[in-house]
Image (cartoon, rainbow, N blue to C red):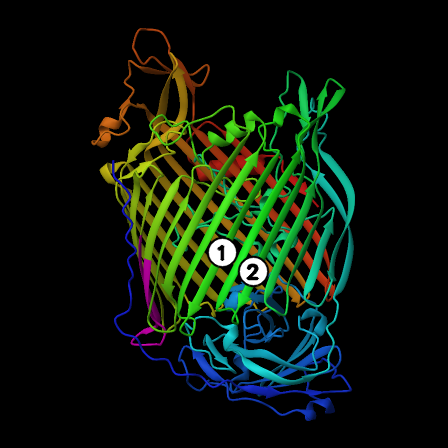
Amino acid sequence: MKKIVITLVLLTPFVFVLSQDVKKRTYETKFTEKAPEIDGLMDDDCWDLVEWTEDFTQTTPYENQDPSQETSFKILYDDNNLYVFVRAHDTEADKISRIMSRRDDFTGDMIEINIDSDYDKQTAFSFTAMASGVKGDEAITQNGNNWDGSWNPIWYLKTSIDDKGWNAEFKIPFSQLRFGKKEVHVWGIEMMRSIFRSEERSHWQFIPKGSPGFVHLFGELHGIKNIKPKRQVEILPYAVAKMERFEKEDENPFADGKSSNISAGIDGKIGITNDFILDFTVNPDFGQVEADPSEVNLTAFESYFSERRPFFVEGKSIYQFRPSSTIVINKLNRDNLFYSRRIGRYPHHYPETGDNEYVDMPEATKILAAFKLSGKTKKGLSIGILESVTANEKAEIDNSGSRREESVEPLTNYFVGRVQKDFNKGKTVLGGILTAVNRKIENPAIDYLHDAAYTGGVDFKHSWKKRTWYIAAKGTFSNVRGTETSILETQTSSARYFQRPDANHLSVDSGLTSLSGYGATFRFGRNSKEKWQFETSASLRSPGLEFNDVGYMRYSDIIHHGTWAGYYVREPFGIFRNFYLNMNYWMQWDFSGELLSLNSNINFNTQFKNKWRINGSISTQSKNTSTTMLRGGPSIFSPGNLGLNLNLSSDRSKKVSLYLGNYQNFGNHQSSFYHEYWAGIRIRPMNSMSISINPSYGYNNDALQYIETVDINDKPSYVFAEIDQKTLNFTVRINYAINPVLTIQYYAQPFVASGSYTKLKRITEPHADEYNNRFHTFSGQEISYNSVDEAYDIDENQDGAIDYSISNPDFNFRQFKSNLVVRWEYLPGSTVYFVWSQGRTSSNSDGTFSYGNDMQDLLTLCCVSVC
């Protein structure tokens, strides 16, 4: 057995270049008794109260150089608002990019003002004006390492264009900012200008590229006196009318071809203090949210989908707690103690039905109410609390007119609490998180769910030497409680597989009613504006760790170590605009000390001076040990592989831009082969419209694809086959902006996948040195296809009697998803949506891939349409 040997490899740079201190700039604002009219024109006398400031410094592509175009601005304030006027001079005014888009698309020529009103040097509020008049806004946290585009404050903007450039006039209510009660204020401030046609950026306060942090390097805004913190109050009641059309089924009383309903709810945002905001929602509806992408999942693990619901997206960064190191690896990179998609999910249970019984199944668990309390005190304490209650969701079952209800998801309470405390202006950060899930289970059929689940963690980070060096650590714990059935389900789930016969350090205890676990991570690294950066890390998760009730986790029982180093050239040279090179490796063991995998990767990313981009990577994995491939059976040696990736994209500022990419993976011993190709084209026929088409095609050939585990004389037999899987996907988006507050978006995704299984086999010696000795492929005397039952009959001992049958695993899956969203922000903070959605799904066991025939069959299906 290979034992654990962890070496923390510190890849330190050979040359350190001493950085020069950058002089901090200041701007003196003044109070105005008469507010300017927000019209994008400087025709109000009050603007004469303050001076222009200019002298921006270019940061991209040429750092610390004069910009190609001058920029200047003025700032005023009154008792309730901050006013900003920016003059973006342009000697080629006819080339100003005025792309019209939806809010927060950040495209075209832009002016951005960032305000650290708390002056904690860690957080800020960003307001962006596009030359077209479109607004963008983001909440900045973690000293600029996190930008939350879901933050949508109420503010006002007008822009204008003339033959000498363009103007942007901002009105930012103090109710949207956070600051303390004091007589004299000093705020951090930064202004940025982006010229779209040349991808040039310039800043008022020069901040070198690659600096370890952003907010703490802002310039300063002086002159604000005697303003009072404002309480933010926004109440938004809403009503939703919904009509649905679908295929009628004569014998199914729930499928009569149509349905309609009207629902109502309320959203709100209340400033408890100037430091803390309470967001709440009652009976929310998320009909305007784009559907999840289609996929075929043949793994043992749950699919991961990004959160798109506005209530859970806005301000989500405070609730994030990723327990693993920063090395990006498939096993751990998405894991999080809080995965908001758990709240309002599709119900866990589906009722068992008899003949002539039909089920009306809820599409999602109803969220009765939810609230979030978040903010940061003047002393640097950040607090986030989320509480949500979901309904006891019931399915209705009809049997020849007689109906009954059955609970398919219990009444559940979700709680997440997060705190972080900054010390020494954020150079040291200490935090913690606690989550709780409590269920009231009334249906014995779903007693496999936990009655209660608790997780927690602490995190710490300290940086020094102008924040270039850092150490960080995290610790996590979990405790789940429930019936013996639920804890047995947890022990034997894909995240741990305690039942593995060769895992001597694991065992199943069917009498347990609780299970606990722990994890930890340590990181040490250098992050600076110099050319070299690196990090080395180690992490572990005990076998009993479990946070899937309100988090997302694929693996426990793992120890991980990795190191990465990066070489960055941020200034143009030769034909290049910039160049980045990263190298990393990582290793994994289980808690018995068995080495599971050894991986390495090298990747690069560069942009040419013509603004085309290219990036790629090479990855290798040595022979590894999979503890999940046999779905609870013994571990198995898996061949190593080589992965290659290359992507190319054109100048994004052009009317037509495109990208191409591919990924190739080759398994050792010809055990597998995977290739995927993708492409995209985006066309802007006019400033207010964009059309994008993004096709992708993937082909997977794997000699060992799991099918089923069967018992023969109380002995498990693990049945696999060679799979030929093909997937073709198109994503089409059409965006049309009538004006900055009225937009139309259309999304469509036809998706076709097929899988053909051949060479069925069973695992014989999973730890055999020779790859071909690990399995036995069934011969013609051992296997035959039963066309009547559509199954493979298998006679392993060739005694003439069928030992077991395997249903035909071949598949064809077809799906079409589309939606149309009309969004009108008729007042700042008030929005009306019209949503139309359509879906078509079909499948069979043919296994033959034919995109034309599959699409034709899909389009002949009756669709499900929702308005």
Q: Amino acid at mark 1?
A: Asp
Q: CA distance from mark 2 to mark 1?
A: 9 Å
Residue drawn where x is 48% and y is 42% of the image: 553
- The extreme top residue here reads 800
Residue 803 figure quarter: top left
- The residue nearer to you, when weighing 646 against 786, is 646
Q: Is residue 816 left or right of residue 667?
A: right
Confirm whether the magenta stretch covers residue 574. Answer: yes
Q: Depth check: 579 or 101 in front?
A: 579
* Residue picked out by circle 1: 459
- Image location of residue 461, percent across then percent down: 46, 62
Q: Dot 2 corresponds to which residue?
A: 420
Identify the residue shown where x is 61% and y is 27%: 447
Question: Magenta span: helix, strand or loop, mainly?
Answer: strand
**Residue drawn at point x = 70 percent, y = 48 percent:** 285
Give yes or no for contact between labels 2 and 1 (Cβ–Cβ under 8 Å): yes
Which residue type carries mark 2? Answer: Gln
Which segment is the magenta one?
564-585
Q: Is residue 214 above or below residue 56?
A: above
Rendered view: 276 above or below 307: below
Circle 2 SS class: strand
